[in-house]
Amino acid sequence: MTSVISAPPHTPVAPPPVVSGSRRWPVALGLGLLILLTWTLVALFWRHLAPFDPSSQNPADKFASPGGEHWLGTDQFGRDVFSRVLAGAGSVLAIAPLATIGALIVGTAVGLVAGASGRWVDEAVMRVLDTLTVFPAIIASILFVALLGQSTPVLILVIGLAFVPIVARSVRAATLVERDKPYVEAARLRGEPTWSLLLREILPNVLTTVLVEATARLGDAVFAAATLSFLGLGAAPGSPDWGASVADNRAWLQIAPWTALAPALAIASLVVGVALVADDLRARTERS
Amino acid sequence: MRHLLLRRLAAIPLTLLAISALVFLATEVLPGDVARQILGREASDATAAQLRDELGLDRPLPVRYADWLVSFFSGDWGTSYTLKVPVRELVFERLGASMLLAVFAFVLLVPVALLIGVLAGLYHDRPVDRILSVTGLALGATPEFVTGVVLMVVFAVSLRWFPVSAQADPGASLVNRLEHLVLPAVSLVLLCLGYVARHVRASTVASVRSPYVRAAELRGASRFSIVTRHVLRNSTVPATSALGVQAQFLLGGLVSVELLFNYPGIGALLLTAALDKDLPTLQAAALVLGFCYLLITLAVDVVYRLLDPRLRLGVAV
């Protein structure tokens, strides 16, 4: 669950890539990037694209079927579902990348330090990370949000924290490979300070790992952000956020299925887009 | 093997203690006044103070933690602030409901994942494989409440094959209860299917290329016997470890699926307890779920080792 979601320490984590071998499928990467680009543009410019004000209510026109003036129908307050889906893109597309970037920065730093320093620092850091992941992330997230209150910054913090151990482990593994290579040894003998060894010598060579982690975590972060806001732990009620909209409209599923279906499919398209890009990138780096 | 098992078992109480401390700290430092939360804004200061006194909220933290731990282990889990019922019965009743759902999902997941994984592996890099693999990837990336909404609209609202609610009438037969659970269970299965099937597929591809399958082919063994006796057997090992990784997705999935389908399980209980700041229920539900998670990962680890003779006998792989 990621999500909401981190893997237990004792099991192999990375699943084998979907498309293996020499015959790659560039269609998947292209499609994924196209979906990502589309939703990013929508998140930025929805004000110019939405045919209606996403929060303007019109009780006389509630539960209008899709088609006609309202492409995707209207909800229980007569709000235009299509406009709300467009307006809701910004929420998840802000939370997920911010949480991912935070986790990448902290996780890369921790992984670099653990991988490059001596045995007991490494051991201590890894034990702490193991302890963090022993607790199912979903329970931790719920406790955290209950503790700190429902808000977008808390959501970003919770998701980012859950991903730090995952990123740190991958970066540490990559750092262990680089650490003893001659170029690092040479830099050390030149008398480069430790920070420079880490940032100027090792970091550029583990960037591929960081990039693969970035796309994989971004997918998980979208998953987590959508789920937590569906659970009512994120955006305020009434916001056009996709997860929150599905939760708000699930009660009307039998009379107006489009109200919940539209934001649900929007989430599905976004996560699939990210997954296609992430899987392709991972397969490429594993081959090279 | 035995040594490792003992070590893992010994770690459980320690991990549980860490989890309990975390749960206690998280719930005790909750912002907002619990007494006010329960009584509402209009209550007078005196009533609030009296309730704080009644709930023991005014004592120092370590005392309350020790007290709480002792009463927890002696089986006194307190009374739910909001539902006014004993927490222990409540948590176990909901846990039972969730286990029914989780076991049902598991029973559906394993054969389907093995079938799809082996099929994709046997026809690897052909269209069947591509379609199965990309579908699995897409479904695995999609939150279970999203697939759940789609399943509900298609199979419950439009086709009317299954009930909309996951909750059967009280006293319903097991078959009837399971019928209500098909859609929630399938949403959970679809989330994990791709991931587990991918591991099965990878090991199938490896074993199809292996000398022992080649040898079996040359001996003239039928394709069916090769698949069941050699390929499938070797695929169960990665499938088990993949299932272990999925255990936490299943836990997370329980919360949102139970919410979506209005199913009174422990995930939904945990969520409502957190949102309502119902501390005793929240603490108990979080601890019990954490314990279940520990048990699942331990069980997967043991089964994983039992299935692989190299690990079982401690031979270096």
Image (cartoon, rainbow, N blue to C red):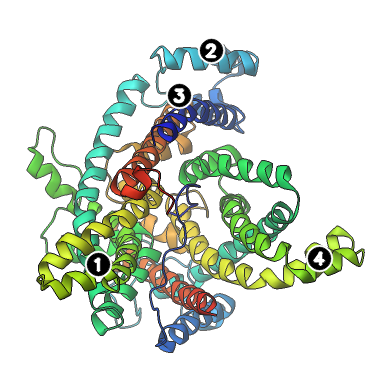
Mark 1 chain: B
**Residue labelled with disc 3:** B280
Question: Mark 2 or mark 1, which has the lower sequence index?
Answer: 2
In this rendering, the answer to whether A159 lies above or below A88 is above
Report, in whole angstroms, how far the alpha carbon at label 2 lies from the one at label 1.
61 Å
Is A38 in front, or is A168?
A168
Residue type marked 3: Pro
As measured in the structure, the alpha-carbon distance from the residue carrying label 4 to the one carrying label 3 is 56 Å
Of the 4 image quadrants, the one containing the N terminus of chain B is top left
Left or right: residue B311 versus residue A122 is left
Residue B212: image tag? 1
Q: Are marks 2 and 1 on the same chain?
A: yes
Q: Are marks 2 and 3 in contact (CB under 8 Å)?
A: no
Q: Are marks 4 and 3 in contact (CB under 8 Å)?
A: no
Q: CA distance from mark 1 to mark 3?
A: 57 Å
Q: Which residue is mark 4?
A: A185
**Chain under numbered label 4:** A
